[in-house]
Amino acid sequence: APYNNYKEHLYKILVIGDLGVGKTSIIKRYVHQNFSPNYRATIGVDFALKVLNWDQETVRLQLWDIAGQERFGNMTRVYYREAMGAFIVFDMTRPSSFEAVTKWKEDLDSKLTLANGKNVAAVLLANKCDQGRDVLTNNGIQMEKFCQENGFVGWYETSAKVRIRTHERKVSAVCWIKVKT
Ligand code: GDP
Ligand code: MG
């Protein structure tokens, strides 16, 4: 038989963060390349599939949008189950949404552990960067430090409104590299 190293992977990736930070918008941008200023507040859980092709491998990122369940409780435990990675999103223009990031991270880590005993890879997304950069994120070094201290594998500025391809590629790359290991 011919040598075949073609592989397919399916990963559940959570998209979490406070209400209104742009989770649904980021997913729509990333998966469907569009933006609308008024998405209905979704109720329950939404899914979107982003397919990445890397050499001989196909990676399907199943993005879970927490959609209307933006509070902690038993609901998040069920929702987090079997996830391989998480994007924790905050709004660059809203400091309180940044403060909530550590709460989301703690909620996630307290309810979900990988089979190898480690926490799931979490990437921090600073959304709405088209609106100007908040003082919080003006200093990249501080954010690096924040990520190290709080167990994030990295952080990226994003905008669901304005497409930034280089950012998109980096996010895809980090997702792939981190979930692969
Ligand atoms: P969610 O509650 O976290 O899912 O947030 P939504 O995706 O519903 O977005 C909340 C609001 O922020 C909506 O009015 C969006 O149009 C707006 N929004 C989301 N992302 C961006 C962005 O990157 N830039 C700007 N300017 N507005 C955004
Ligand atoms: Mg939403």
Image (cartoon, helix red, strand yellow):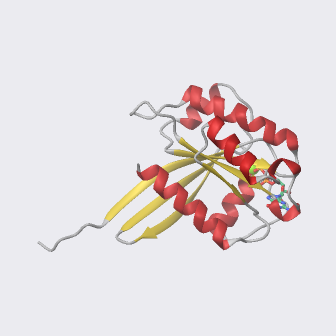
Question: Residue 157 falls in which quadrant of the image?
Answer: bottom right
The residue positioned 50% from the left and 65% from the top of the image is 51
**Residue nearest the viewer, comparing 141 with 80:** 141
Q: Position of residue 53 (x, y in %)?
A: 44, 70
Q: Position of residue 67 (x, y in %)?
A: 71, 45
Report the quarter where the N terminus lies.
bottom left
The residue positioned 76% from the left and 63% from the top of the image is 159
24 left or right of 91 in image: left
- Looking at the image, is 78 positioned above or below residue 171? above
Q: Position of residue 141 (x, y in %)?
A: 72, 50
Q: Determine if residue 73 is in view.
A: yes
- Looking at the image, is 106 positioned above or below residue 97? above
Q: In which quadrant of this rendering is ligand 1 seen?
A: bottom right
**Farthest residue, direction left:** 1
The residue positioned 22% from the left and 69% from the top of the image is 4
**Residue nearest the viewer, comparing 171 with 21:** 171
The residue positioned 45% from the left and 35% from the top of the image is 114
**Farthest residue, direction front:** 141
Q: Determine if residue 89 is in view.
A: no
